Amino acid sequence: MALNETVIEAVANYNFKANAERQTVNADSHQNRLQLLAEASLAQQLNRMNSLDPAEAASISGVVSSDLAEKLGELAGAVANSQQLMKGAQTTLPETGQG
């Protein structure tokens, strides 16, 4: 006895629906795994950005300190130069040409 066409069609539709649902669940699971991976990666990068190891902190401190010392030296030179100019301006000129 041959199977009824509606039964064959119903079984085919059920199989198709079950396959589609499985693929949807797999896609959702995959997307969730990728989201977790992205969040973990972002957290790791932010942690690296927010923390310095001692060697890196010391080198940054050294650069900032040397730059500050250089700027203070330049400022001291400018002040000394200004003082020399002011001393020159305060000096009275010699009287010449008086008879």
Image: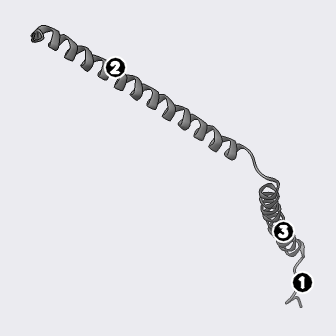
Q: CA distance from mark 3 to mark 1?
A: 36 Å
Q: Are marks 1 and 2 in contact (CB under 8 Å)?
A: no
Question: In the rendered image, which residue does mark 3 sit on?
Answer: 73
16 to the left or right of 43: left
In the picture, measured across the screen, residue 7 lies left or right of residue 34, that is: left
For residue 65, what is the image quadrant? bottom right
Dot 1 lies on which element? loop
Q: Residue at point 30% right, 22% down? A: 19
Q: Is residue 5 above or below residue 85?
A: above
**Quadrant of the drawing holding the N terminus:** top left
Tell me the CA gap for discs 2 and 3. 74 Å
Identify the residue under disc 1: 94
Mark 1 residue crowding within 10 angstroms, few (<14) / some (14–19) / many (20+): few
Q: Can you say whether 32 is above or below 85 in the image?
A: above
Q: How many marks?
A: 3
Q: Identify the residue under disc 2.
A: 21
Q: Earlier in the sequence, mark 1 or mark 2?
A: 2
The numbered mark at residue 19 is none
Crowding at mark 3 (Cα within 10 Å: few <14, some 14-19, many 20+)? few
Tell me the residue at 84%/68% (across/down). Answer: 73
Provide the secondary structure element on which disc 2 rests. helix
**Of 12 and 47, which appears nearest the observer?**
12
Between 60 and 55, the residue placed more toward the observer is 55
Q: What is the spatial separation of the Cα atoms under label 1 and label 2, in whole angstroms?
A: 106 Å
Judged from the image, the secondary structure of the residue bearing numbered disc 3 is helix
Discs 3/1, front = 3
Contact between labelled residues 3 and 2, with CB atoms less than 8 Å apart: no
Which residue is drawn at the image coordinates 55% and 32% (left, top)?
36
Residue furthest to the front: 1
Q: Amino acid at mark 2?
A: Glu
- Corner quadrant of residue 14: top left
| Nearest to N terminus: mark 3 or mark 1 | 3
